Image: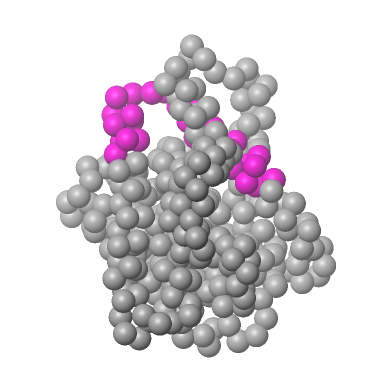
Amino acid sequence: MAFFISLEQICIMFILMAIGFLCRKKGMIHEETGKDLTAILVYIVGPCLIINAFERPASASLIKDFGLTFLAGSLNYLFPIAFSSLFLRLPRLKNDPDKQLIAFGAVYNNCGFIGIPLIQALLGSKGTFFAVPILVLNNIFVWSHGIGTFKKRQPLADTLRTVLFNPNIIATAIGFVLFITGASLKFPAVIDRSVSYVASLNTPLSMIIIGSNLGTISGDFYKDSKAWLICFLRNFLMPACMSVILLLVPLSTTAYLAVVIMAAAPVAGFIVMLSLLANRPVAFPMRCLCLSTLMSVVSVPVIIMLASWLKQLV
């Protein structure tokens, strides 16, 4: 049942992607339009979604699960980082010019653009609440370890500034204050409803943006063996391992599935952006991004089904 429910939602998301793809091919979405829509999603819609997820009555069990989700989220990055470090020492990959991309692709995924919409659809706002720690940790790891796989790490002060002033972190702080204070401190009804309306744009806007980016891909991207390697690591091996490891953390079923879904998202769009920042060719990371996103229509339902089955056993 979990497989078919998640497959149905993935199909809906791919229909939305197809709309973005066709809009790009027909010239309705241009490069600058895509950048503008991405900025709206990152700086306005995403933070509203996070704040909206915190609007629920606080309880001891909910706060406990939220804290445990931070621990689980840390494992969600520390394990793939350790695994990829060992994996890239294999003789075949040790001197590979793209080994930084393989390391990055194995660890970081599109949890914000794909993980959050899927959780929103399958688990509701409570699931989104448990996805927030993963978003926070994703920003911390990407702008410290992640950027360091491409170029020399920036000074600690710059890293802290980048992380702390990230809109998702600011929204998390605002949302957590509202969550802890409960009825004593909350937005006026007109603002609260406005935030809710903007938050509802997350899934369709995310998918349309991803689809428009896929519309720029050309050539036989599916023939790249190294792209397939990254997709296997990112789409199947890492989330399958995390489904088992996360059973060691006493999470509720909703929190556990939220973390697993975030772990199962395909390769992060950051792989292209950081390649551009490091003055590296983007053809290979674009192939990885495209192939991994398309493969997620199969891999994500499989991982969700595996995680649901494992959770029932313990």
Residue 44 within the magenta-colored segment of the rendering: yes
Q: Quadrant of residue 280?
A: bottom right
Give how far across and how far down residue 254 sits, in percent: 34, 43
Q: Nearer the viewer, residue 71 or 191?
A: 71
For the point 30% across and 43% down, the residue is 71
Give how far across and how far down residue 151 sits, in percent: 51, 63
**Magenta stretch, overall SS:** helix
Residue 193 within the magenta-colored segment of the rendering: no
For the point 40% across and 82% down, the residue is 95
For the point 34% across and 68% down, the residue is 84
For the point 67% across and 58% down, the residue is 209
Residue 33 appears left or right of 97: right
| Magenta-highlighted residues | 40-68
Give how far across and how far down residue 136 sits, in percent: 46, 43
Q: Residue 157, relative to residue 260: is it above or below?
A: above
Give how far across and how far down residue 191 sits, in percent: 66, 24
